[in-house]
C-alpha cells in the first residue's frame, strides 16, 4: 500500500501504465457490436505510458476541477455525518494482478472504504431523487474492494451548492465477490493484451527480444 499523496507527481508516476479503479468502467464498456471505443482508447493510453514511463496528460474540465477542489470538504462532511474517521491512502496494488491498482479516497474502520464524488448539481439532484448508487460508480467501487480486500464502501455524493439538508448523500455498497471475480478475469485478459502490445512494439521498433 503506497503512502504517496493522491494528485501529487509521485502518485501520477506510481500509477503510470497501471489499470486503475476509475478506468474499470472504460475497460468494460460495450456496444451492440462488441467492445466500446473507450476500451480501445484506454488500452492505447496505458501502452503509451508503459513505453515512455510517463503519465499521459489528461484533460481536466471545470466539473473535474470542481470535484478536486471540494473533495476535502466532502470528507469532512462525511466524517461529521457518520461519526467515522477516514484514513487517507495513496495507491493499493491488486494483490494478484500485476499492473492494476486502486486509489480509494479513504480507509474507514477495519473493513470499509469511502469514495467521494462532488458532481455537477444536476447529477447530484438525480442521485438524491433516485436514492440509489449511480451505476457508473459501481464497477469502480467493486474494484477498490478487490484491491484492498475490504468488505464495503460508502459512496458519497456531495454538493455544497445545495441547501444543507441536501448537500450529502451516502450509499453503503457491499462487496460483491461474484462481480469482482468477473472483473478480475476481464482485467487479467486486458492487461495481458497491453503487455503483448508493448512487447511487440519494442521488438519491432527497438530491436528488443520478442
Image (cartoon, rainbow, N blue to C red):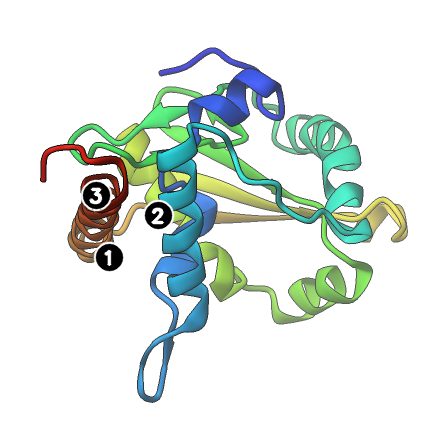
Task: Give the left or right position of residue 123, taking residue 7 as reference.
Answer: right
The quarter of the image holding the N terminus is top left
> Of residues 156 and 33, which is closer to you in this image?
33
**Does the residue at mark 2 contact the one at mark 3 (Cβ under 8 Å)?**
no
Q: Does dot 3 land on a helix, a strand or a loop?
A: helix
> In percent of the image, x 44 and y 22: which residue is there?
14
Task: Give the left or right position of residue 170, taking residue 151 as reference.
Answer: right
* Among the two numbered marks 2 and 3 on one chain, the one whose residue lies closer to the N terminus: 2
* Among the two numbered marks 3 and 1 on one chain, the one whose residue lies closer to the N terminus: 1
Label 2 Cα neighbours within 10 Å, binned few <14 / some 14-19 / many ≥20: many
What residue did someone put label 2 on?
A: 142
What residue did someone put label 3 on?
A: 195
* Among the two numbered marks 2 and 1 on one chain, the one whose residue lies closer to the N terminus: 2
Point out the residue furthest to the top here: 3
**Does the residue at mark 3 contact the one at mark 1 (Cβ under 8 Å)?**
no
What residue did someone put label 1 on?
A: 179
Numbered disc in front, either 3 or 1 = 3
Asked whether the viewer can see residue 139, the reply is no
Label 1 Cα neighbours within 10 Å, binned few <14 / some 14-19 / many ≥20: some
Question: Where residue 116 appears, x then y in whole percent?
Answer: 61, 40
**Does the residue at mark 2 contact the one at mark 1 (Cβ under 8 Å)?**
yes
> In percent of the image, x 42 and y 32: which residue is there?
52
- Residue 40's disc number: none
Label 3 Cα neighbours within 10 Å, binned few <14 / some 14-19 / many ≥20: some
Task: Give the left or right position of residue 132, taking residue 168 as reference.
Answer: left
> In percent of the image, x 29 and y 33: which residue is there?
147
* Number of callouts: 3
Using the image, determine if residue 167 lies above or below residue 41.
above
**Separation of residues labelled 2 and 1 (CA atoms):** 8 Å
Q: Does dot 1 land on a helix, a strand or a loop?
A: helix
Q: Which image quadrant for residue 94?
A: top left
Question: Where residue 150 appears, x then y in whole percent?
Answer: 31, 31
Amino acid at each position: 500500500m503506497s503512502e504517496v499523496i493522491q494528485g501529487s507527481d509521485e502518485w501520477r508516476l506510481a500509477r503510470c501504465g497501471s489499470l486503475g479503479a476509475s478506468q474499470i468502467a472504460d475497460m468494460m464498456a460495450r456496444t451492440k457490436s462488441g467492445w466500446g471505443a473507450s476500451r480501445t482508447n484506454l488500452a492505447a493510453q496505458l501502452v503509451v505510458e508503459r513505453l515512455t514511463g510517463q503519465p499521459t496528460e489528461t484533460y481536466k474540465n471545470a466539473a473535474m476541477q470542481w470535484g478536486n477542489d471540494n473533495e476535502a470538504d466532502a470528507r469532512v462532511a462525511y466524517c461529521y455525518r457518520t461519526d467515522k474517521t477516514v484514513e487517507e491512502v495513496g495507491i493499493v496494488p491488486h494483490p494478484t494482478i500485476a499492473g492494476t491498482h486502486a486509489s480509494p479516497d479513504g480507509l474507514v474502520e477495519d473493513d470499509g472504504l469511502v469514495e467521494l464524488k462532488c458532481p455537477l448539481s444536476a447529477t447530484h439532484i438525480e442521485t438524491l431523487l433516485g436514492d440509489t448508487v449511480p451505476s457508473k460508480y459501481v464497477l469502480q467501487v467493486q474494484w477498490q474492494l478487490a484491491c484492498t480486500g475490504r468488505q464495503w464502501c460508502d459512496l458519497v455524493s456531495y454538493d455544497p451548492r445545495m441547501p444543507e439538508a441536501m448537500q450529502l448523500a451516502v450509499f453503503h455498497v457491499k462487496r460483491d465477490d461474484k462481480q469482482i471475480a468477473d472483473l478480475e478475469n476481464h482485467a487479467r485478459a486486458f492487461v495481458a493484451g497491453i503487455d503483448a502490445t508493448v512487447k511487440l512494439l519494442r521488438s519491432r521498433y527497438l530491436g528488443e527480444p520478442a
